[in-house]
Amino acid sequence: MVVNLSKRDSAKELKDIIVRDFENRKEVDESIRLKEQNIVLKGITGTNRKEIDASVWNELGLYFLQNRMYLDALKIYDHMLHTIMKTESGKGIEIHKGLPLHNMGVAQINLKNYDEGIPNILKAYEEDIKTFGKAKAEAMLAHRVKEGLFDFVSTVIDNNFLKGFNVCSGLNVKDTASLMENMDETEKLFFAKTVNSKKLITFHDDIYTRIAMFDNLRDLGLLLESNLKRRSKQVGTLPDLIMKLFSKEEWEKGFEANKSLKSYDDTKDFQDKLEKIEKLKFSGKPNVDFLTNSFLTIALIRNFTAHYLIEQLDILKDQKKYDGIFAREVFAMLYSLNYPIK
């Protein structure tokens, strides 16, 4: 027998589901509150975590993760972490915290909260090393998630930017993963955070999206400056470093000659100069002009974003323009990572 539900019946059924879900979540909150009144991990010593791993709380947390209910999972594992820390406090015992830290990190990354999610994955990995040793820790989930972030970002760059970079620069870079060997661990994670954010942001004309887009432009400039300083052991602003380290390259002459395009008078001047850089043909040689334009773009953006947080830029409201600017920053990064800094 086929039952046809009217619109009213369907709406009531949906409302009932929402109410039940809301009540269930209230019960989770209340259960956490009651649980916090007791030391439920009493008797656990050293690295024994069987009670935690097998607990109903972990089962519930895993259910939330598997069903993409990341805020609920975060609540469960945050509670688990604080319970462990409360149990440790003043008792001279140490309990392994890798499980809640790892699953909190997974939930936060899926919520696009990379600033907290990535550090929690790293903390979980450090916990694994401390408890089990480096060899075993490298076979555990936290290490695999960390390495997975690096693999993901290299694949994104390979698929979206590397072919265009090779064609326009005249170089033949095999893959981004090999270039990332010239980054330290911190730089790799910062790069992963930025590329993940760029890929996962759906273009909308709202303040949150514009700020996230602004941050991505800023972060690439900051990352390049930091990477060049570390590898060269030199100091200075990004334009100074570019002129010092790439002085023998033909494209750098155009970079140096167009000094006015690396600074700005106001927001309008900044945006006008971004467009001038895009159209600039300094040498008449496509590969040379391509590199000159890429480095002028990232130098100007590094200069501007070091002093301002302005979400009302025109380039943040035009996806095509924004994507072009982001790409030129990535191209400057790829060239720099491929270049033998001495």
Image (cartoon, rainbow, N blue to C red):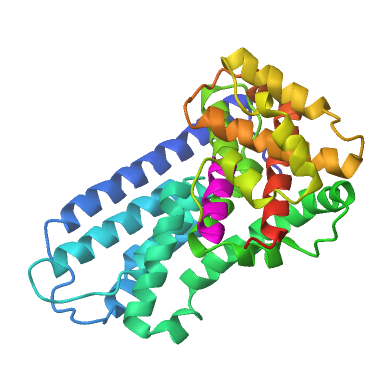
Question: Is residue 244 found inside the magenta-colored segment of the image?
Answer: no
x, y percent for residue 84:
22, 66
The number of discs equals: 0
Is 278 left, or right, of 259 in this rendering?
Answer: right
User: In the depicted view, which residue is nearer to us: 63 or 330?
Assistant: 330
Who's the residue at 89% across and 50% down the image?
A: 167
Main SS class of the magenta portion in the image = helix
- In the displayed structure, would residue 316 be above or below residue 89? above
Q: Which span is picked out in magenta?
A: 219-233
The image quarter containing residue 315 is top right
**Quadrant of the drawing holding the C terminus:** bottom right
Residue 50 shows in this picture: yes
x, y percent for residue 328:
73, 39
Who's the residue at 17% across and 54% down the image?
A: 34
Who's the residue at 48% across and 77% down the image?
A: 140
x, y percent for residue 226:
52, 50
Residue 326 shows in this picture: no
- In the displayed structure, would residue 312 be above or below residue 85? above
The image quarter containing residue 105 is bottom left
User: In the depicted view, which residue is nearer to us: 174 or 212?
Assistant: 174
x, y percent for residue 257:
73, 31
Who's the residue at 30% across and 43% down the image?
A: 26
Is 2 left, or right, of 52 in this rendering?
Answer: right
